[in-house]
Image: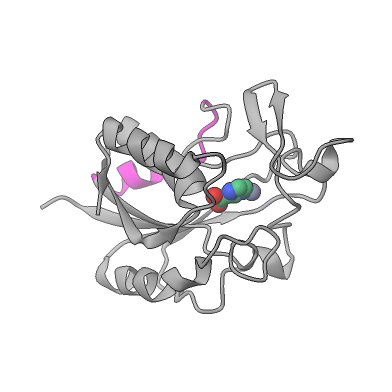
Amino acid sequence: MLREALVVIDVQNDFCPGGALAVADGDAILPAVNALISRFDHVALTQDWHPAGHSSFASSHAGKAPFDSVTMPYGEQTLWPDHCIQGTPGAEFHPGLVWTKAELVIRKGYRTAIDSYSAFFENDHTTPTGLAGYLRERGIEAVTLCGLATDFCVAFSALDAVAAGFKTTVALDACRGIDLGGSMSAQLEKMRQAGVTLV
Ligand code: VGL
Ligand code: ZN
């Protein structure tokens, strides 16, 4: 039997209704996410964890507004409202997330100059977070992903997981997306093409 892990992406206050970068209905996934957590033997969480003044914040770029984009040394970067600032309530896991069972929390986006959507790599697609090594060292061969947001952090994580050789599934009923300029359908198609199982 394949050894499997669940990776729960960014179920944090700022991505839920009332938060700084609220995903529509983000908190509606909690029952489905918690049901997955109870089913899996191995659970890891990610936590978007930015220093104040992070380069992915529109407020760090004169004349730019949230959801504009800029060219960074590592490529195109969408700009966001200030969100998930280290140590703030917005960066905490949603109070309805039953996270106590998690074996690992991967924090990402903690370096000012570079964003990190994926649980596996920063947005330069070369700096690893260490998650692939952790999973491999523990003998995990298959990962299921859920969380927020489907078309950003979940999709980037799923594409990196499948590229790293993990059998990869995304549990769509336990995800919600931002859908910026058609990003939802584009990312779903990209995941399908890459061999990610969408359920
Ligand atoms: C995310 C935008 C900025 C996400 C994180 O979790 O999908 N999106 N930071
Ligand atoms: Zn972020």
Q: Is residue 138 magenta?
A: yes
Where residue 146 sits in the image (x, y, percent)?
39, 57
Establish if 129 lies above or below 102.
Answer: above
Task: Spot the residue most to the right.
Answer: 62
Furthest-bottom residue in this view: 96
- Residue 87 image point, x, y percent: 73, 64
Rendering coords of residue 112 (x, y %)? 75, 39
Residue at (39% x, 45% y) in the render: 134
User: Is residue 196 within the magenta segment?
Assistant: no
Q: Count numbered badges in the picture.
A: 0
Residue found farthest to the left: 1
Would residue 164 be seen by someone viewing this image from the given angle? Answer: no
Q: What x and y, as percent, mark residue 125?
A: 51, 27
76 to 27, vertically: above or below = above
Q: How did the renderer colour the structure? A: one colour
- Front residue of 185 and 47: 185
Q: Nearer the viewer, residue 180 or 126?
A: 180
Looking at the rendered image, the quarter that the C terminus falls into is bottom left
Q: Residue at x 51, y 68 (%)?
A: 25
Q: Is residue 43 left or right of residue 77?
A: left
- Determine the image quadrant of residue 23: bottom right
Q: Residue 71 occupies which quadrant of the picture?
A: top right
Query: What's drawn in magenta, residue-wise?
Result: 126-141
